[in-house]
Image: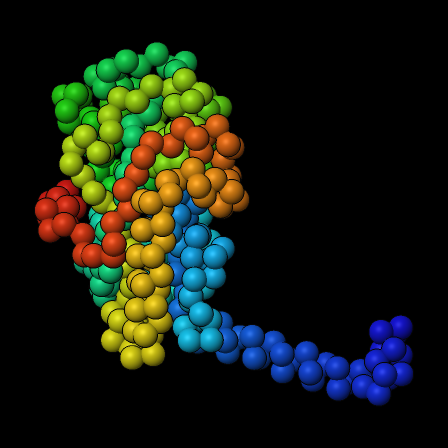
Amino acid sequence: MLSAMLLVGCGQSYEEAKEQSARERAMQQKKEAEALKVGVLPTIDCLPMFIIKEREWIDTAKADVRFKDIESHIAADDALRKGVIEGSVTDIVRAERMKRQGVALTYVASTPLSWQFITNKKARIKELKQLTDKMIAMSRFSATAMLADMAVDSSKLKSEYVFRVQVNNPQIRLKMLINNEMDAALLPEPQATTARIAGNPVLMDAKNRDLRMGAIVFTDKAMNDSRRRSQIDAFIKAYNQACDSINHYGIANYAGIIKKYMDVDSKTVRSIPKIKFEHAARPREKDIAKANSWLR
């Protein structure tokens, strides 16, 4: 009532104010629909996107690109399928599986996303062959599931005696390991660094197996639309600029951004290993082939 009276006193009726608010909402919805939306996760491979967002390296007047925080790759997959977002970070296994399910996707970049197989220090697992009757946190139909299989196969264990537990969110995966709710977990950076600092041992590293499974994909629908394509081109240009900046100044230079978007402390940021960020380019064919071989 008071608000309505004030509005009337200022020469604008309550109904006029409602109409104006409705128009503003409609305008915001229109802008949101026209913007290029890219799904990002709280992982180090998304650092270039967070830098672009914080530094405002894309002129929104020319190309409105918005980064949407998503808690897991599986949630990003669902958003892509429904058209909620046009592009997303993912892993190649997930992308190839989506393609098989009829989701038309194009790779625009290979990212430094990688995982370490880290065990709970209290489980006292020193070798992969000790995984019998142990629980491993991973995500189904993903690179983490593939790596879990590789760990089990390399230790010559019977697969049915190792329990793979689906935990899609990498931050929850870390918390479950730290809280002794899991015997092992496949963790990306910076979550892997936090786990190592806490004294949890690494039994396998995807980097040592020459695997590069991180990727950025966009729907073919977006790639084939001239307006969307100009937005994607602006994104790629800014992405390459961010990669160059990280490689030049180092990850630690962006400690504030990492802590803000990845929920880690300064000690973790200082301990993240050196990571090289490549310019946007299609992933290696052998990594795509590896993903498809495992999916069979």
Q: From the viewer's side, name the closer residue of 92 and 181.
A: 92
Residue 99 visible at all: yes
Asked which quadrant contains residue 154, the reply is: top left
Q: From the viewer's side, name the closer residue of 255 and 13.
A: 255
* Coordinates of residue 142 in the picture (x, y in percent): 27, 44
**Residue 185 to residue 43: above or below:** above
- Relative to residue 29, is residue 275 drawn left or right? left
Q: Residue farthest to the front?
A: 248
Which quarter of the figure is the N terminus placed in?
bottom right
- Relative to residue 264, is residue 233 drawn left or right? left
* Residue at the image position 57 percent from the left and 79 percent from the top: 26
* Coordinates of residue 271 in the picture (x, y in percent): 40, 28
* Residue at the image position 21 percent from the left and 34 percent from the top: 207
* Coordinates of residue 148 in the picture (x, y in percent): 24, 32
Q: Which color scheme did the rendering employ for the protein?
A: rainbow
* Coordinates of residue 103 in the picture (x, y in percent): 25, 64
- Relative to residue 266, is residue 223 drawn left or right? left
**Residue 65 to residue 167: above or below:** below
Please give the count of numbered marks on the rendered protein: 0
Residue 163 visible at all: no
* Residue at the image position 34 percent from the left and 68 percent from the top: 234
* Residue at the image position 34 percent from the left and 37 percent from the top: 188
- Relative to residue 207, is residue 177 drawn left or right? right
